[in-house]
Structure formats: C-alpha cells, structure tokens
C-alpha cells in the first residue's frame, strides 16, 4: 500500500486490516503517536487525515491510501506547543501528542474558541485531568496565531465558460 505520511509518500507491505497506528509506530518508527486503549475511546492515537483528527488505532491503514496523514512529528513548531509549555499542561505526558493533534484540529477551524467549543472538541481522555490548563493553552495559542485567513473570493463563471 502507498501512504502519504508527513509529506512523504511511502510504499509499505502490511495487511489490509492493520490499524494505521501500528503502521506508524511499528513499520515507520513514528512513536509520537501513542497506543492508549485500542478501541478509539481515549484519543492518545490521534493523527490528522486530510486535515481532520482521527483515532488511528481503529482506522485501517488501507483506508488511508490516497489521503494526507500528519502525525505529531510533523506538527511543530506550532503555537500550541509553546502554549502547552507556558501553561504547564503536561503532567505525566502520555496523552499529550493526541491532545496537541486534537487542539491543532480545533484551531485550524476556530481561532476564537469558547470554553464550550474547546470542551466539545477536546474529547481525548487525560488521566491527569489537566483539562483546565489545556483550555488556557488553546486560548493562548489561538491569540498568538491570530484570526483564520479569509479565503480568496471565487469569481463566478461567465456564461461563455459554462459547458454542459
């Protein structure tokens, strides 16, 4: 199978039912993505697939063909990482790569998240319960990052350009 991981296209020979997490960790040595529960509940294994957060422990690698996969190894430097340190978010640190990937997903869509927005988005589990510090760090990073860029307006097609 051919996968695009962190901007590099790689040809791999793995079983079709192999979870993406195991391809990242065992085949490629990208161990920043963590194994937590193995059933998609805790979020320690969160990566980005085409710009959105997914739980890689339950996502078959074969389904990731033709997509762009981004892991924690490709995140930095990011305003979130700096904010994470300033706000002293990590305690044990085990879930933090998944938390950072989930937070980056949120900030890619919303640069002015409320506490409710953060709580709704940050569904990964943290055994150390550093959720209040995560909220502060996400808001700090959002402020540093500034507003989302405004997309360029799309020019309407002229009648002569429309083909049937």
Image: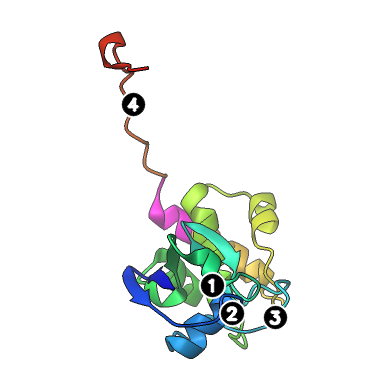
Relative image position of residue 133 (x, y in whole percent): 61, 70
Q: CA distance from mark 4 to mark 2?
A: 41 Å
Relative image position of residue 140 (x, y in whole percent): 49, 60
Q: Which residues are magenta?
A: 141-147
Looking at the rendered image, the disc whose residue lies closer to the viewer, 4 or 2, is 2
Check if mark 2's residue and mark 1's residue have beta carbons within 8 Å.
yes
Name the residue that disc number 1 marks. Answer: 61
Front-most of 86 and 119? 119
Q: CA distance from mark 4 to mark 3?
A: 43 Å
> Is 34 inside the magenta-drawn segment?
no
| Residue 49 can be seen in this image | yes
10 Å neighbourhood of mark 1: few (<14), some, or many (≥20)?
A: many
Q: Give the vertical position of 61 relative to 52 (above or below).
A: below
Name the residue that disc number 3 marks. Answer: 38
10 Å neighbourhood of mark 4: few (<14), some, or many (≥20)?
A: few
Query: Viewed as shown, does residue 161 lie left or right of 30?
Result: left
Relative image position of residue 40 (x, y in whole percent): 70, 72
> Which numbered disc flags the more N-terminal residue, 4 or 2?
2
Name the residue that disc number 2 marks. Answer: 18
Residue in view at x 41 percent, y 78 percent: 73
For the residue labelled by badge 1, is the local secondary structure a helix, a strand or a loop? helix
Name the residue that disc number 4 marks. Answer: 154
Q: Give the vertical position of 74 relative to 14 (above or below).
A: above
For the residue labelled by badge 4, is the local secondary structure a helix, a strand or a loop? loop
> Which numbered disc flags the more N-terminal residue, 4 or 1?
1
Q: CA distance from mark 2 to mark 1?
A: 6 Å
């Amino acid at each position: 199978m051919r996968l695009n991981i962190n901007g590099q296209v790689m040809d791999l020979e793995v079983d079709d039912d192999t979870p993406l997490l195991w391809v990242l960790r065992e085949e490629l040595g990208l161990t920043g993505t963590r194994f937590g529960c193995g059933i998609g509940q805790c979020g320690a294994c969160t990566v980005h697939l085409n710009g959105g957060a997914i739980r890689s422990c339950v996502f078959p690698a074969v389904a990731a063909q033709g997509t762009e996969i981004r892991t924690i190894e490709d995140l930095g430097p990011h305003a979130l990482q700096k904010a994470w340190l300033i706000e002293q978010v990590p305690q044990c640190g085990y879930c933090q790569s998944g938390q950072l990937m989930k937070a980056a997903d949120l900030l890619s869509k919303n640069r002015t998240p409320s506490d409710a927005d953060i709580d709704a988005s940050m569904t990964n589990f943290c055994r150390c319960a550093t959720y209040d510090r995560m909220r502060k760090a996400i808001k700090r990073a959002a402020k540093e990052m500034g507003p989302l860029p405004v997309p360029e307006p799309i020019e309407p097609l002229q009648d002569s350009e429309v083909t049937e």
